[in-house]
Each structure stands twice: as structure tokens, then as C-alpha cells.
Image (cartoon, helix red, strand yellow):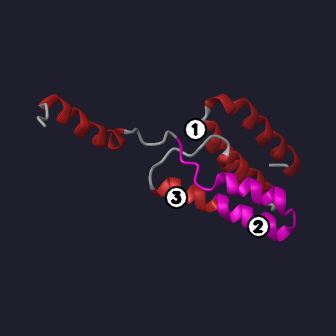
Amino acid sequence: MKINLWHLLFVCSLFTLPGCGKPPLFHWGNYEDSLLQRQENTSEEGQLEAFKILETTIQEAEEKNGRLAPGVYADYGYLLFKQGNSKEAIENFRKEAALYPESKYFMDSIISRIEEKSGA
């Protein structure tokens, strides 16, 4: 059986295609797990676990210089706000607005409401 050089090159190129994929556009980490955790376990313990998952997801993205998925900073800011940490919550809402300008109006609205309530 005679193997044509073009057939051989074609078959070899098929093995290299998986390595040519683009890296993911966003770093999602375990964001979905955090959402699921909050839905399944509404206790304070469950909320804290969800918070830790988000915190780890953000740290991973920042360490890898990855672009964090839309909504993660906002969600993290919301959890910080629920814990009474308004200052860090606002910082995360601003990060969300800077990373995703389409969310700026909404993030600014949330920030202004927090600042009005806290008298800042």
C-alpha cells in the first residue's frame, strides 16, 4: 500500500489542530458553583462558602492576568455589601464598571445608593 505524502500531511495536521485553539475570553473559575451554593444553602454558612468561592475565582483571574467574567466583580461587591463592607463593595462595583462599560450606569446607580445610605 502506497501512502501519498499529502494524505500523510493531512492526517498529521489533524493531530495538531486541538493545540491551535484560542484561550478562553473570560476567566469564569467557579463562579457558577458560587451561584449554586447560594441557591442551595441560604444559611449564613452557605453564603460564606459562596463568598469564598468568588474570592478564589477573582484571585485566580488576577494571578493569571485573565479577564474576569462579566458580573463577577458586581456579584462579589454585592456579597461584600451584605456583610456590611460598603467600602470594598463600592471598589468592586467600580472594577465591574471599568471592565465592562455597559454596566457603568447600573454600577454608578448602586454606588450612589450605598453612599446616600452611609452618608459618605
- The Cα atoms of the two marked residues, 1 and 2, are separated by 25 Å
Give how far apart the Cα atoms at labels 3 and 2 are.
18 Å
Furthest residue in direction bottom, as rendered: 45
Q: Reading the chain from its start, which is encountered first: label 1 or label 2?
A: 2
Q: Name the spot of residue 102 as percent of width and height, x first.
A: 65, 28
60 vs 120, left or right, is: left
Determine which quarter of the picture holds residue 51.
bottom right
Q: Residue at x 58, y 49 (%)?
A: 28
Q: For this view, does 104 lie left or right of residue 98?
A: right
* Quarter of image, res 82: bottom right
Question: 55 or 115: nearer the eye?
Answer: 55
> Which residue in the protein does label 2 denote?
48
Considering only vertical position in the picture, is 118 above or below 84?
above
Residue 38 image position (x, y, % from top left): 80, 58
Q: Main secondary structure of the magenta part?
A: helix
Q: Is residue 52 magenta?
A: yes
Query: Which numbered mark, 1 or 2, is in the foreground of this view?
Result: 2
Residues 65 and 15: in front is: 15
Give the tally of numbered discs: 3
**Magenta segment includes 70:** no
Residue 50 seen by the camera:
yes
Describe residue 30's horizontal placement relative to residue 84 as left or right. left
Tell me what residue is drawn at x 66 percent, y 58 percent: 54
